[in-house]
Amino acid sequence: MELPANNADYREQDYWDTRYQTEEKYDWFSAYSSFRNLLKNDIKSEDKILMLGCGNSTLSEEMYKDGFKHITNIDFSPVVIQKMADKHSDLQEMSWLVMDICDLRFEPCSYDIVLEKGTLDALMVHEKDPWDTSVETLQKIDSILQQVTSILKPGGKFISITFAQPHFRKPLYACDKYNWDVNVSTFGNSFHFFYFVMEKGKQLSEKDRINEKERQKRKQERSCEKIVYLKCDDEEEFLFGIDL
């Protein structure tokens, strides 16, 4: 596996295209068998499934062989999509599309399940403080989630498998505007991973609604804070832009 020069490279298509040219397969976190029982509770064999950022994971293949035939796999790397389409040409009911998860080009209410494993984590690995996610990343995640809830059918589910602990990830998912509830389970032995399920059409729990209102209130308070600038007669103009 070719590791990136820095974590921010995980967001770049060029890094993945280069890596996929030589790498045959790689699975983030645990194998399908470790959370199969959770998926079996949430997905029916006839469900239409969208896999976000499929990469060269074996997850889609294993799910297909376990009875989940209707899987659309997308990734922004044309290299990996071509390799995976060629490799799994015998799995005829499964499809492979070059598509960026930031620009989901599907009709509203077209999927029963949207599934991601580690894809959103890859968008966030450059963040320095998990308690204070950058505005850029928050906006990108919000855009993705709004697109996800749009393409889900009523009663459909967004399943997110991540190493991010709930107190970091749940605030991103538990927003009333997405029109879903949020539930989380754990799996794994020596190291725990987290399995989030958001079902479209259900309401957030009372606790999640209160927490969201508190987050919105804090956000408004921060936006109303006045910025104070240093003022000086010095010719060094950059000093005028230093925030206190």
Image (cartoon, rainbow, N blue to C red):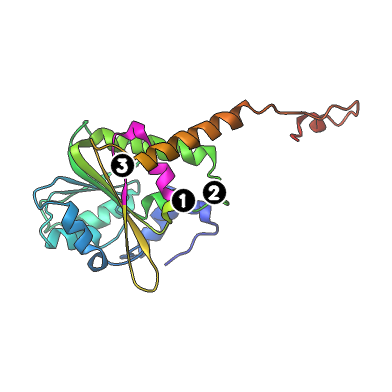
Is 45 rendered above or below residue 28? above
Q: Image point 36% across, 38% down: which residue?
A: 144
Residue 77 magenta-drawn? no
| Quadrant including the C terminus | top right
Residue type of the residue flagged with mark 1: Phe
As helix, strand or loop, the secondary structure at mark 3 comes to loop
Residue type of the residue flagged with mark 2: Trp
Residue 177 magenta-drawn? yes
Q: Which mark is residue 168?
A: 1
Left or right: 159, with 126 as reference point? left
As helix, strand or loop, the secondary structure at mark 2 comes to loop
Q: Image point 76% across, 34% down: which residue?
A: 242
State the separation of the CA atoms marked 3 and 2.
30 Å
Q: Which residue is mark 2?
A: 131
Mark earlier in primary sequence (3, 2): 3
| Quadrant including the N terminus | bottom left
